[in-house]
Amino acid sequence: MFNELFNEITEEQQQLVAGGKSISDYINTNYYQDLTAFNFAIGSGPHGSYVTQEFASLEIDTSAYKDFYLDSDDPYMAY
């Protein structure tokens, strides 16, 4: 008879009777890029001498996260 009772109610109702809902959701993403470029040219000729130099640096550091909790029993997710 106990099994028949729980077969006749929805899953959500079973969770409520069994102790409630517990949903935990955590998503994290990170991106890091470090680029350095160095370029130079040097020369001499009948029309004179030259030196050119270029330096470029690019650093990208970004991250994002999302969290979602609903009656979470997880102690690591409690903020």
Image (cartoon, grey):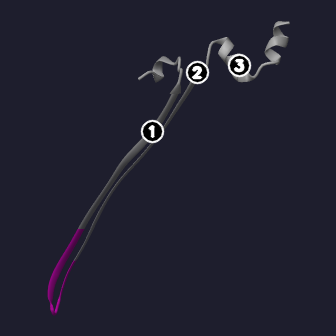
N-term mark: 2 or 3: 3
Residue receiving disc 2:
22
Q: Earlier in the sequence, mark 1 or mark 3?
A: 3
Q: Is residue 16 magenta?
A: no
What's the amino acid at mark 1?
Answer: Tyr
How far is disc 2 from disc 1 in space, using C-alphas?
A: 20 Å
* Residue 38 location (% of width, % of height): 27, 65
Report x, y in % for residue 16: 66, 16
Q: Quadrant of the C terminus?
A: top left
Q: Is residue 32 left or right of residue 49?
A: right
Query: Of all residues shown, which one is farthest toward the left?
Result: 48
User: Would you say the residues marked 2 and 3 are in contact, meaning their CB atoms lie under 8 Å apart?
Assistant: no
Residue 10 location in percent, x, y? 75, 22
Q: Which residue is mark 3?
A: 13
What's the residue type where badge 3 is placed? Gln
Depicted 26 relative to depicted 4: above or below: below
The quarter of the rendered structure image containing the N terminus is top right
Residue numbers of the magenta segment: 42-54
CB atoms of marks 1 and 3 within 8 Å: no
Q: Which residue is mark 1?
A: 65
Asked where in the image residue 39 lies, by quadrant, the reply is bottom left
Q: Secondary structure at mark 3?
A: helix
**Nearer to me, 26 or 50:** 26
